[in-house]
Amino acid sequence: MIYFDTIKDFALKDINFFFIIIEIFTASIMSFVAVLSFSRSKSISSFFLILTSFFLFFRMTARILTLLHILYIDQIKISGVSIYSHILEVLPYVTLTIALIAISLKKNQ
């Protein structure tokens, strides 16, 4: 029971660290599976799904480096707008939309 209390105390004290580990693990597996799936079906839709997973991985990496005060991506601004953080937020949605459009056009043929 002491072991559970120490894990509970550790999770409560540094909950950000716990979520960082989960996010790194899931993003890494997602990118790895995306690359493996592209080797099986080399289509436009799978290519854009791979791009989506990589952009999500880059976004996660930038967010973690910002959280750890290693990278300050929000301080890079053009006309007072943080361009790089907005680009990292939008790119996964754009590539996912293109992949889903490619999938829907392929199914209709």
Image: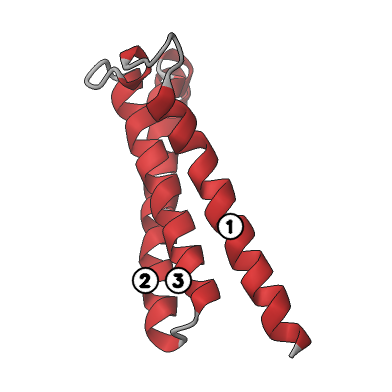
* Distance Cα–Cα, label 1 vs label 2: 15 Å
Please, which residue is most extreme toward the front here?
79
Which secondary structure, mark 1? helix
Q: Earlier in the sequence, mark 1 or mark 3?
A: 3
Identify the residue under disc 2. 35
User: Residue 60, image x and y in percent?
Assistant: 40, 38
Identify the residue under disc 1. 96
Q: Nearer the viewer, residue 22 or 5?
A: 22
Q: Amino acid at mark 2?
A: Val
Q: Is residue 27 above or below residue 13?
A: below
Q: Does 95 sit left or right of 109 as displayed? A: left
Q: Earlier in the sequence, mark 1 or mark 2?
A: 2
Whether residue 41 is visible, yes or no, is yes
Q: Amino acid at mark 3?
A: Phe
User: Residue 81, image x and y in percent?
Assistant: 46, 15
Which secondary structure, mark 3? helix
* Distance Cα–Cα, label 2 vs label 3: 9 Å
The quadrant of the picture occupied by the C terminus is bottom right
Residue at the location (44% across, 8% down)? 80
Identify the residue under disc 3. 47
Q: Is residue 50 above or below residue 81?
A: below
Asked whether disc 2 touches disc 3, contact meaning CB atoms under 8 Å apart, the reply is no
When asked about the image quadrant of residue 17, the answer is top left
Q: Is residue 12 above or below residue 109?
A: above
Asked whether disc 1 touches disc 3, contact meaning CB atoms under 8 Å apart, the reply is no
Judge the density around disc 3: few (<14), some (14-19), many (≥20) Cα neighbours within 10 Å. Answer: many
